[in-house]
Amino acid sequence: MVTTKPGPEATLVLTRTFAAPREEVFRAWTDPEALKKWWAAGPGFTTPIAEVDLRVGGRYRLGMKAPDQELPYVVGGTYRAIHRPARLVYTWVWEGTDGPETLVTVEFRDRGTVTDVVLTHEPFADAADRDRHTAGWNGCLDRLAQVIDTRVA
């Protein structure tokens, strides 16, 4: 049996600040209609699937469709911890692949009228897989910022 010890390439950590109160940012991550507005990796992507059973042990499914694809990329998992409005922990596995299950932890840090979001996604098999997810998450977080900015304007 071969075992590997996770190195720094196994973990993705992103931090973003959003111009909205923590409860609103938390809701954007947990409300299906809100997720459809921002959960997509880049320009032209849409989110035709957003299903959320927000309880420990509940499942979620999110699907993003690239502009040049017929079928969406679908990810799903199970909520492991929910501490409204401070923290979410959930598993992550892409449907239709034999990829491993990973874990996403999202912390919502209150700073009055703004919220810092710290996203940790781990473990990845290698740096290439981590970097692909980093690009996707950055695209999603960019879209979330646009949705929040539009609301504020």
Image (spheres, grey):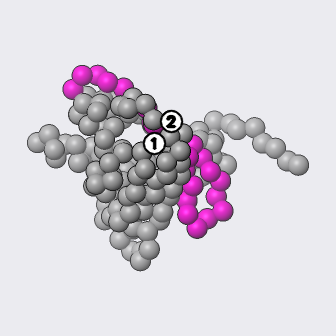
The picture places residue 31, in percent across and down from the top left corner, at 32, 48
Expressed as whole percent of the image width and height from the top left, the position of residue 121 reads 54, 41
One can see residue 85 in this view: yes
Residue 69 drawn above or below residue 7: below
Q: Is residue 107 above or below residue 111?
A: below
Q: Position of residue 116 (x, y in %)?
A: 35, 29
The spot of residue 94 in percent (x, y) is: 55, 59
Q: Main secondary structure of the magenta part?
A: strand
Crowding at mark 1 (Cα within 10 Å: few <14, some 14-19, many 20+): few
Left or right? Give the position of 95 relative to 148: right
Quarter of the figure with the C terminus: top left
User: Which residue does the image show at 53% across and 44% down from the upper left?
Assistant: 57
Q: Residue furthest left?
A: 153
54 in relation to 83, above or below: below
Tell me if residue 141 can be seen.
no
**Dot 2 lies on which element?**
strand
Q: CA distance from mark 2 to mark 1?
A: 8 Å
| Front: mark 2 or 1 | 1
Type of amino acid at the residue the image marks with label 2: Ala
Q: Nearer the viewer, residue 2 or 105?
A: 105
Q: Residue at x 49, y 51 (%)?
A: 59
Q: Which residue is mark 2?
A: 81
Query: Magenta part of the protein: which range?
Result: 87-113
Q: Residue furthest top?
A: 111
Instruction: Say left or right for 94 vs 145.
Output: right
Residue lying furthest right: 1
Residue named by callout 1: 55
Label 1 is placed on what type of residue?
Answer: Arg
Residue 133 on the magenta segment: no
Q: Which mark is residue 117?
A: none
Please tell me which residue is depicted at 48% across the width and 63% down the height of the picture. 74
